[in-house]
Image (cartoon, rainbow, N blue to C red):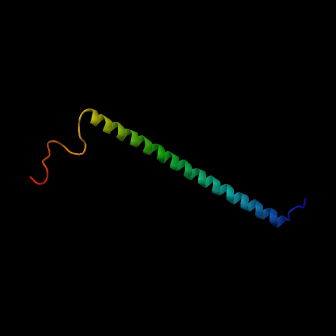
Amino acid sequence: MSQLDPESTIELQSQIAHLQRHIENQDAEIYKFAKRIDRMDQLLKLQSDQIKSLSERGVDSSSSSSERPPHY
């Protein structure tokens, strides 16, 4: 097995370091996206629970019975 010359070794080490930084940056971004998705899931559950609660009470969220249509 032949050995790499010092320049090739340095170049490979440089590329590995670059890839490691890239992976760390991607991991950080994925973590941020996961936290954002978690917050969105919580908000969606809250809104879903609110809609369910309104439906169970018989409240139509699309219109109010006390409002008159615009043509009156």
Foreground residue among 6 and 37: 37
**Residue farthest left in this picture:** 72
Q: Quadrant of residue 3?
A: bottom right
Residue at far bottom of view? 7
Quadrant in the picture for the N terminus: bottom right
Side (left or right) of 39 relative to 68? right
Q: Nearer the viewer, residue 40 or 32?
A: 40
- Answer with left or right where residue 71 lies relative to residue 19: left
Q: Note whether 55 is above or below 37 in the view shown.
A: above
**Residue 9 position by quadrant:** bottom right
Residue sitting at x 47%, y 47%: 36
Which residue is drawn at the image coordinates 28% and 32% (left, top)? 56
So how many labels did they put on this image? 0
In the rendered image, the vertical position of residue 42 relative to residue 29, given as above or below: above
Q: Position of residue 50 (x, y in %)?
A: 32, 38
Residue 15, image x, y percentages: 72, 61
Residue at left 72%, top 58%?
16
Task: State left or right for residue 38 relative to residue 13.
Answer: left
Q: Position of residue 69 (x, y in %)?
A: 14, 50
Q: In this view, which residue lies farthest toward the right? A: 1
User: Could you tell me which residue is drawn at 64 percent across and 57 percent down?
Assistant: 22
Residue 25 lies in what quarter of the image? bottom right
